Amino acid sequence: MTPNEPAVTVDLDERSYPIHIGCGLLSHTDLILSAITSQQVCIVSNEQVAALYAEPLLNALSERDTLLTLLPEGEQHKTLGAIDTIVDQLIERAFDRTCCLVALGGGVVGDITGFAAASYQRGVKFVQVPTTLLAQVDSSVGGKTGVNHERGKNMIGAFHQPESVLVDLDTLNSLSDREFRAGMAEVIKYGLALDAEFLDWIDTNLDALLRRDQSALAKAVATSCRIKADVVAADEREAGQRALLNLGHTFGHAIETHTGYSSWLHGEAISAGMCLAARLAETEGLIDSALRRRTEDLFTRTGLPTEPPHNLDSDTFIALMARDKKARSGEIRLVLPVGPGKSVTTSDYSQRNMVQLIDKT
């Protein structure tokens, strides 16, 4: 497969788009130019990522009207203020409705850039160039964009699909161990929630993945993207099946909100969240103890937390979970496992069991 041939396609009829996956993609000028066709291009990144990876993009686009916008790093800066920063610069440079925004960075940069693209002049093109494992396997695909509110994660946003996704696996070399392991939480999620065969593969190849073995990583990223692409094609706006991709997220988003989006990485929070979901599912008789133990063991082996913060009491935890976007008529709807690679979205569980589960942590 050449760099110009997509590894995965997200099939959304006239809004379908390719996901290119490989090593050294940022060095392929022809691929960059074919993915980014606008004459006015705004690359959005942060200082650390831009120092490493902006130059090849800027060089490839040197004959275009190109703007580089840098945002502060961190989930705590994923706010409407970041949208203002981008839009101010777009207006200052007189960027019109034919412009394209390029998200160069992790999930925070991707979500902010996508929402800015959805909002600016009622919608302009954007391209995802994810540089973290979490963004490559999850947040760069599917068109969920948005920012946080101090009272809830991702409460402000829009569905806005990218034109394409360029996944250069070489960018994973610059990740810290903590960031890399946090990204692994989303890889494991796909196996636990939707694909038992992939779950078995992750279990067998976890050591190679943690060593960042190139061929293992290529398979993990491509398989994760393929699973997500299939789900998005079937349920773009999360009316049904797509909600299953939120396994552990209702618990995890509550943890992130409680900690001010600063001390826990997203993958760390949903790791603990998936373990809580497995424990509740076991208590409810949906899974056996073997799958609950397997879930906890996978995250322990990955070096991720299996428990929420000890200072998060059940009343606060449940109040934060009630703000989740899956909630309906005041009921907290959870994604719970029902077997290896199988999960359901449900509000049919014992509130008392959930309170007792949280109070035990």
Image (cartoon, rainbow, N blue to C red):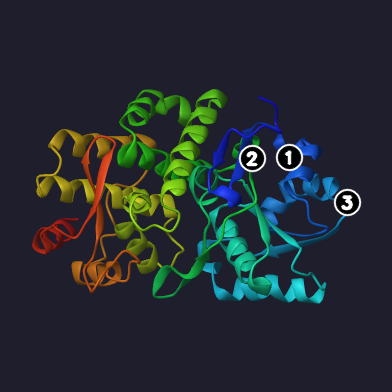
Name the front one of labels 2 and 3: 3
Point 42% across, 26% down: residue = 207
The local crowd at label 2, few if under 14, some if 14 to 19, many if 20 or more residues have their Cα within 10 Å, is many
Give residue 62's mark: 3
Q: Which residue is mark 2?
A: 171
Work out whether mark 3 precedes mark 1 in sequence or the reverse, and give the earlier one. 1
Q: Amino acid at mark 3?
A: Ser
**Count of marks placed on residues:** 3
Q: Which residue is mark 1?
A: 26
The residue nearer to you, when weighing 195 against 81, is 195
Point 64% across, 40% down: residue = 171
Which secondary structure, mark 1? helix
Direction from residue 40 to residue 164 in the image, left or right: left
Point 79% across, 69% down: residue = 95
Q: Amino acid at mark 2?
A: Thr
Which secondary structure, mark 3? loop
Image position of 12 with respect to 221: above or below: below
Image position of 209 with respect to 66: above or below: above
Direction from residue 88 to residue 336 in the image, left or right: left
**Residue 218 rendering spot, x and y as whole percentages:** 55, 29
**Residue 260 rendering spot, x and y as whole percentages:** 42, 69
Q: Residue 262: in sight, yes or no?
A: yes
Work out whether mark 2 precedes mark 3 in sequence or the reverse, and give the earlier one. 3
| Disc 1 from disc 2: Cα separation | 9 Å
Tags 3 and 1 touching, CB below 8 Å: no
Q: Amino acid at mark 1?
A: Leu
Which secondary structure, mark 2? helix
Tags 1 and 2 touching, CB below 8 Å: yes
